[in-house]
Amino acid sequence: MFHRIDLGPTPFEPYTQHLAPSLTEDLRSLVQELRGSRVVHVNSTPVGGGVAEILRSLIPMSKGLGLDTDWYIISPPNSFFDVTKKLHNLLQGAEGGLTAEETRNYRLYGGETSSVDFGPLAADVWFLHDPQLLPLMSFLPEGWRPPIIWVCHIDLSAPNEETLNAVLPDVRKSDAQVFSMPYYVPASLESPNIHIIPPAIDPLSEKNRPMPMKEAQGYLASMGIDLTRPLVTQVSRFDPWKDPWGVVDAYKDAKGAFPGLQLAYLGASHAADDPEGKQIFERLGEYVGQDPDVHLYGDADIPLDRVDRVVNAFQTASDVLLQKSVREGFGLTVTEAMWKGQPVIGGNVGGIKAQIQDGHSGFLVDDVEQCAARIKQLLERPELRRSMGEAARESVRERFLLPRFLRDYLRAAIERKASQQRGTAEASSTRS
């Protein structure tokens, strides 16, 4: 049922160059407070998407600080991921609902409850990530469980209410909940233990380390980009909420003013939990038609072991970066590009609004026309790109780097562990 992702420690000292000394001191103090405790994270897939990417850096950094922590993934059948992708879309506002068969596949992971062995997850605190993990709440052995923190990484600002109400009973079984933004918290949840923790990026990862411009341009040229002409790029899954059709339309509009403009859409994620991606990729290719200046890159175009370097290259060397989402839990691709000194044109939604200060560190847009206008503005004014890019990088340094994220998680874990200990002590006192 559960598979451990084996990751060793990463030294913490190199991170301190990007941090205020007070944050470093906070982290070391919190880790000391958790000394002797074990923290476990569980999610649905080891690669693809922001959750897996965060955990792949968070676990080694935590271990480097001396925290006893591990990461496990679940191993359901493909039918489960077909359902959870639909559930994800419903929770972000899509119409419809799960069928009875889909609900069964979701709640039982396609098997029997007796098959769930929680032994590998023995710990003092659990972090369970996203709706894929909620069915576990019904499988917990009677009288046995650590404090459970459920983490929601998706945009619940305008959910399908029927679907939301269907999952809330399991959400309420967790001891605390983490959301990326305050306005994602369902009013009907009525939980006293809610934490607002925006995601963050690892500045030392291969995707986010500084890449020389010449090296970045070499990657682009090898993938068919003409370096003598301007390039606008969106890095995101092939997902309807990322508005890939709107990206193409904005490019076409801007191309009227810049005939040499090229578009790159990097959607390679290799995520096991996103079966919809291939369908969107094929439909978008049909929508683009025969335009030789539109470059769509899916899983078959970028091997998994090259995705981070290629993304780094495009975020470093593109003239304009987009994230034209119509729903967005947070948008780590925005954070990544801003960290590289790039202003991003982003959809005026979800976590993107928390990252981009409109007109200062990037632009927020509501439709295709606004997006195209901002593309043209940034292409016309390279000095504006530079000044906004400097503001963007500083904003990420102050607010959206991984050590701050870990600090917030550790605070939530310590609070929940202390709460459980108080409850145990009170119950023991009552019995005596």
Image (cartoon, rainbow, N blue to C red):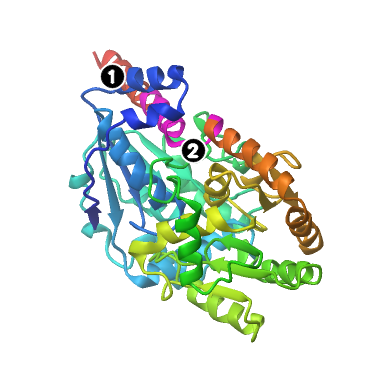
Height in image: 97 above or below 351? below
Question: In percent of the image, x 48 and y 56: which residue is there?
Answer: 214
* Residue 259 lies in the magenta-colored region: no
Q: Nearer the viewer, mark 1 or mark 2?
A: 1
Q: Which residue is mark 2?
A: 178
Residue 32, numbered label: 1
Dominant SS type (magenta): helix
Tell me the amino acid under the disc marked 1. Answer: Gln
Question: In percent of the image, x 77 and y 62: which residue is there?
Answer: 372
Judge by depth and name the residue closer to the eye, 47 or 210: 210
Left or right position of 116 against 185: left
Image quadrant where residue 241 sits: bottom right
- List x then y, in percent, for residue 167: 50, 52
Left or right position of 187 against 301: right
Judge by depth and name the residue closer to the eye, 411 or 249: 249
For the record, the magenta segment spans 398-415
Tell me the amino acid under the disc marked 2. Answer: Val
